[in-house]
Image: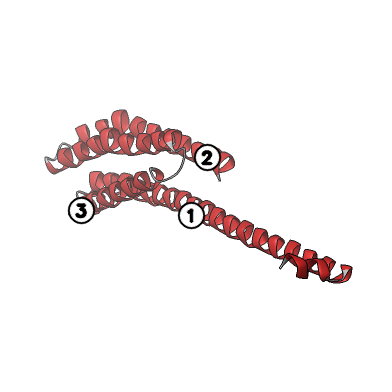
Amino acid sequence: MLQKLRDLKVGYKHLLAFAVVMALGLIGFFRMTNAMNQYMAVITGDVEKAHDADNYIKMAMVENSNMGRETIAYMYTSDEAHRVAKLKADEIAADNLSRAVAIIKQLPEHDVLLKAAEEVRNTDENLCNPYENKILALVKQHKFAEAKRVYSSDLVPARAKMGEAVQRFADEMDQYGSVNL
C-alpha cells in the first residue's frame, strides 16, 4: 500500500491530500452544525417556556382584575351571578399562576424569577382573596357598610400591593430575558 502511494504522481498525491482535508472539513462542519442545532433547540425551548410563563401570569392578572370587578359588582348589586363569577375568576387565576410557577421552575437560573412569580401568587392567595371573600360574606349577610369599609381600607391597598408584585415580576422577566435568553 505504501509503495503504491509512493508511486503516485505528485498531482495525484496533492489531490488525495486535498480530498482528505475536505473530508475532515466536512465532518467538522456537520458536527458543528449538529451542535449548533442542538444549542438552538435548547435556547428556543427556554424562550418558549419563558414566553408561556409570562402569558400565564398575564392571563392570571386578567382574571385578577375580573375578581376585583366582580367583587365590586356583587357588593353594589348583591347579584349572585357576580359572586359566582368572582369565584370562577379566582380558580382560573390560581390555575394560571400555578402553571406559570411550574414552567419557571424548568428554566435555567430561575431563582429570582421564581421568587417574583411566587410573590404574585402569594399576594393573590394570601392578601387579595381573603379580603374579596370577606366582602362576599359580608354582602351575603347584608352588611353593606362593613363590606364597603373592608373594600376601601383593606382590599384597595391589597390590590395595590398586587400591582407592585406584578410589576416586579415583569421587571424580573425583562431582566431574565436580557441575561439568559
In depth, the one of 70 and 167 nearer the eye is: 167
Left or right: 38 as drawn, with respect to 161: right
In depth, the one of 135 and 9 nearer the eye is: 9
- Residue at mark 2: 176
Residue 84 badge: 3
In depth, the one of 158 and 9 nearer the eye is: 9
Identify the image quadrant of the N terminus: bottom right
Element at label 2: helix
Q: How many marks?
A: 3
Left or right: 86 as drawn, with respect to 106: left
Left or right: 146 as drawn, with respect to 94: left
Q: Residue at x 21, y 34 (%)?
A: 145
Picture quadrant of residue 140: top left
In depth, the one of 106 and 8 nearer the eye is: 8
Q: Earlier in the sequence, mark 2 or mark 1?
A: 1
| On screen, residue 138 above or below 22 | above
The amino acid pointed to by label 1 is Gly
Element at label 3: helix
Separation of marks 2 and 1 at Cα, in angstroms: 15 Å
Q: Are marks 3 and 2 in contact (CB under 8 Å)?
A: no
Residue 45 badge: 1
Residue 157, image x, y percentages: 36, 30
Residue 109, image x, y percentages: 47, 37
Separation of marks 1 and 3 at Cα, in angstroms: 38 Å
| On screen, residue 65 above or below 118 | below
Picture quadrant of residue 178: top right
Q: Are marks 1 and 3 in contact (CB under 8 Å)?
A: no
